[in-house]
Amino acid sequence: MFVAARLSDYLLTQLRVALAREHTLLSVPTWAELEGVVRDRPVDVVVLEPVPVTTDDLAPFLSLLRTHPAVPVIVYTSITPAAMRVTVELAQRGVHRVVFRGIDDAPTSIRAIMQDLSDAGWRSALWPWVAARLARGPGGLERAVGELFQAPHRFADVNDLAAAAGLTRRTLERWLTRLGVSSAKLLLVSARVERAHSLMRSSSADIATVAQRLGYHSPRLFARQVLLATGRPPTALRRGLTSDELTSRLVALLDREQPLEAVARPEAAFATS
């Protein structure tokens, strides 16, 4: 999870403790820089403190909410008269959640809030097709692949997916074959490439940043998988490849009953780590 924050030192320290080393926290020193960070990075959640801004000076907040409505925004604040006046105003303008210092900001609580908001903001267009195939299989398999399409960066490889499904890797592959899905590796690649398309369309983040966000150790591997999955380079994810076109391409990649002839599919080329 990539979190951008504009907070006082104390609240920033609290947030850093909550996120630990599993997530990336970027402290933004000025309001003027915040919108640029959201525009240029694949930000999952923005955390803001509503002081010293007053209700008469909400332009930075409102601009962020207006220009990036899909990015969840959390107000993290102390309970003071000045802060509460601004918080009430922001709650009416589209802020997704308010967290109060000393009340509901325990590390596990605030981390869960941010993770829920981050995951809820993403909707896979490919998932309904995948879910329809998996509906006839074990419930654990459908749940695990659903988690994959919600947050692909959490799965480093096929072994992670098999473990989440409560299956051995061999049994996982056997079930996918029976259900008409090409392979677990191609599921991993498809989930990552679809999420990359969304990240690159919603920000100007470069390829290396997006690759890192999705768990790739190398931008080169990311580029190779995008090319093999879509027939185009990663730059096409930002322009020239619509969501409908990408979904159709990935369905063809995953559909064992209708093999994709336009793209060579050597499994070794789809290694995910």
Image (tube, helix red, strand yellow):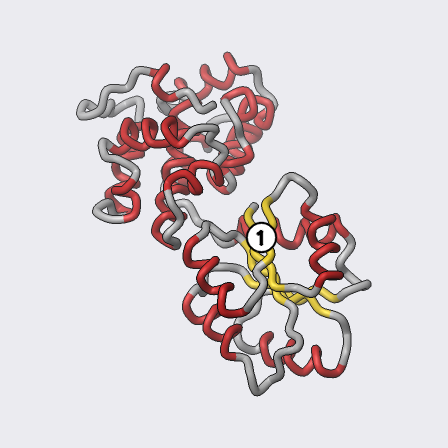
Seen from the viewer's position, the closer of residues 116 and 217 is: 217
Foreground pick, 77 / 130: 77
Residue 101 visible to an observer of this rendering: yes
Q: Is residue 96 left or right of residue 207?
A: right
Quadrant of residue 45 within the rendered picture: bottom right
Residue 145, percent across and down? 49, 33
Q: Crowding at label 1, few (<14), some or many (≥20) Cα neighbours within 10 Å?
A: some
Q: Position of residue 9 (x, y in %)?
A: 72, 61
Q: Is residue 219 left or right of residue 48?
A: left
Q: Residue at x 61, y 43 (%)?
A: 23
Q: Is residue 17 above or below residue 154?
A: below
Residue ID for mark 1: 26
Residue lying at the far top of the rendered structure: 170
* Up/down of 193 relative to 8, above or below: above
Total numbered labels placed on residues in the image: 1
The quarter holding residue 127 reads: top left
* x and y, in percent, of residue 189 in the image: 39, 29
Secondary structure of residue under mark 1: strand
Point 66% across, 75% down: residue: 51
Is 197 in front, or is 175?
A: 197
> For the residue marked with disc 1, what is the amino acid?
Leu
Q: Residue at x 74, y 55 (%)?
A: 14
Residue lying furthest front in this view?
Answer: 29
Instruction: Residue at the far right: name it.
Output: 102
Q: Quadrant of the N terminus?
A: top right
Q: Is residue 14 above or below residue 188?
A: below
**Residue at 67% across, 83% down:** 85
Q: Tell which residue pokes out farthest to the left in this image.
A: 262
